[in-house]
Image: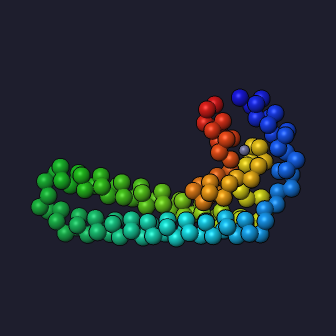
């Protein structure tokens, strides 16, 4: 698997050594990440609201629930907590990514050294591999 990539890396290494994106491109990434952060923040807020409601329901009417009902509510709450935690983790990733955008070493594939496309960074802010290298990694 590695052999094919090495050959390709050799041919693309020249362009990659510069490691500079234009200011406009950096700005595009920053804007995309900021928008992503807003979306995640909104989702997270909704998730917390959801959790608060579940918690309130639980306290309000758990006395009258049968066991199956209580069980499904507990499950629902656990799923909601997992979701909230995932969102928080992604928010942290995006925030770290935004911090790193200006540093010059953000958004470059660790494997082949090519610039990771802006769209990919917006979707996966913590991506350290370009799509083709990621696919190679997954196939191993
Ligand atoms: Zn790559």
User: Residue 48, position in %: x, y?
Assistant: 39, 68
Q: Is residue 52 left or right of residue 100?
A: left
In depth, the one of 71 and 91 nearer the eye is: 91
In depth, the one of 103 and 59 nearer the eye is: 103
Q: Is residue 113 left or right of residue 136?
A: right
Identify the image's colour scheme: rainbow, by chain, secondary structure or one colour.
rainbow
Ligand 1 is in which quadrant of the figure?
Answer: top right
Res 54 → quadrant: bottom left
Res 77 → quadrant: bottom left
Residue 138 to residue 25: above or below: above
**Can residue 24 be seen?**
yes
Res 44 → quadrant: bottom left
Image quadrant holding the N terminus, namely top right
User: Residue 109, position in %: x, y?
Assistant: 73, 49
* Residue at 55% over, 65% down: 36
**Can residue 95 be seen?**
no
* Residue at 32% over, 69% down: 52
Residue 140 to residue 38: above or below: above
* Residue at 67% over, 67% down: 28
Q: Is residue 26 left or right of residue 126?
A: right
* Residue at 76% over, 30% down: 4
User: Residue 11, position in %: x, y?
Assistant: 84, 40
Image quadrant holding the C terminus, namely top right
User: Residue 76, position in %: x, y?
Assistant: 30, 55
Q: Is residue 60 left or right of residue 122?
A: left
Count the marks: how many?
A: 0
In depth, the one of 23 and 46 nearer the eye is: 23
């Amino acid at each position: 698997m590695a052999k094919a990539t090495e050959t390709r890396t050799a041919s693309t290494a020249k362009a990659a050594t510069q490691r500079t994106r234009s200011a406009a491109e950096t700005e595009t990434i920053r804007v995309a990440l900021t928008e992503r952060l807003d979306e995640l923040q909104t989702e997270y807020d909704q998730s917390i609201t959801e959790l608060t409601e579940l918690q309130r329901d639980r306290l309000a009417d758990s006395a009258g629930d049968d066991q199956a009902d209580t069980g499904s509510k507990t499950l629902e709450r656990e799923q909601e907590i997992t979701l909230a935690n995932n969102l928080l983790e992604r928010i942290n990733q995006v925030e770290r990514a935004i911090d790193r955008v200006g540093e010059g070493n953000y958004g470059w594939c660790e494997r082949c050294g090519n610039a990771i496309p802006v769209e990919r960074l917006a979707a996966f802010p913590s991506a350290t591999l370009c799509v083709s290298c990621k696919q190679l990694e997954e196939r191993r």
